[in-house]
Image: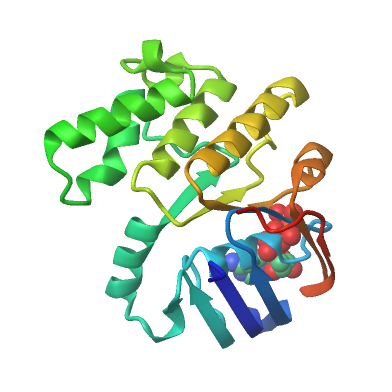
Amino acid sequence: MHPVVLKQVGKTYHLDAVDVPALSDISLEIRPNCFTVISGPSGSGKTTLLNIIGCIDRPDHGEIVVAGQDVQKMSDDALSDFRARHLGFIFQNFNLLPVLTAYENVEYPLMLTKMPAAQRRERVLALLDAVGLADRAGNRPGQLSGGQRQRVAIARALAPAPKLVLADEPTANLDSQTGAAIIALMRKMQREHHVSFVFSSHDPQVLAEADDAVFIRDGRITSVERRTEVPA
Ligand SMILES: Nc1ncnc2c1ncn2[C@@H]1O[C@H](COP(=O)(O)OP(=O)(O)OP(=O)(O)O)[C@@H](O)[C@H]1O
């Protein structure tokens, strides 16, 4: 089953009296267990598309099925619950809670689930270990480097065992060496956790790693490159 299917999705922002068309006639299938990169020039609609796939924003029209669910039909409350259970998010500014430690940031999404405390602890420690931060669990984001913060964000995104992780320009605020290490880590986690990753990115390093690359311009898909066989 494809984790995301979009059919003729459109979105226009209304800014005072001005209509700003952001996406037109987007039809796309995101393959399971893949790295999919959405690429295009500034203002082409990448973030808008990612927000719609991540159920943060709703399209004006069209169909969208995420993890087998017709999300267009869900109420706002049902959609929030669906997002918390099935989707993970990684942002260019890391978006960690500054007053919480690395451990608490990763634990946070699990507090919204009914996971028992002992199991929660085991999962958080395993994820921090997997991203190479076992010894930094007690540090707050302000005591971590950019690359380390993004590692915490990756662990947090994977904590609820999502089906899909959305990453908006995840390497934009990192130098190229740190960015390369973060891409390698996301690839490793994507394979180990059998999850689909969808990125928006300008970064050639992210594009080079993609299984699928979706190019957009002026809110329309100009091409889709399927570069690899569907992983088992
Ligand atoms: N909240 C908003 N209100 C009005 N217009 C918006 C809003 N968000 C985005 N837009 C417009 O929608 C279009 C697509 O924007 P979007 O942020 O999706 O592009 P992008 O490809 O992610 O750009 P960038 O690479 O610069 O982040 C642009 O014309 C933008 O100005």
Please name whichever residue, 22 or 165, is drawn nearer the observer in this view of the structure: 165
Residue 149 visible, this angle: yes
Q: Is residue 135 left or right of residue 206?
A: left
Which quarter of the picture shows residue 230?
bottom right
Classify 149 as above or below 36. above
Q: Residue at x 52, y 36 (%)?
A: 94
> Residue 125, how many percent across, how many down?
31, 24
Which quarter of the picture shows residue 118?
top left
Please name whichever residue, 130 or 95, is drawn nearer the observer in this view of the structure: 130
Number of labels in the image equals 0
Q: Residue at x 60, y 40 (%)?
A: 92
Quadrant of ligand 1: it is bottom right
Q: Residue at x 34, y 34 (%)?
A: 106
Q: Is residue 43 left or right of residue 10?
A: right
Q: Residue at x 61, y 78 (%)?
A: 6
> Residue 128, how many percent across, how many down?
39, 24
Classify 113 as above or below 106. below
Q: Quadrant of the C terminus?
A: bottom right
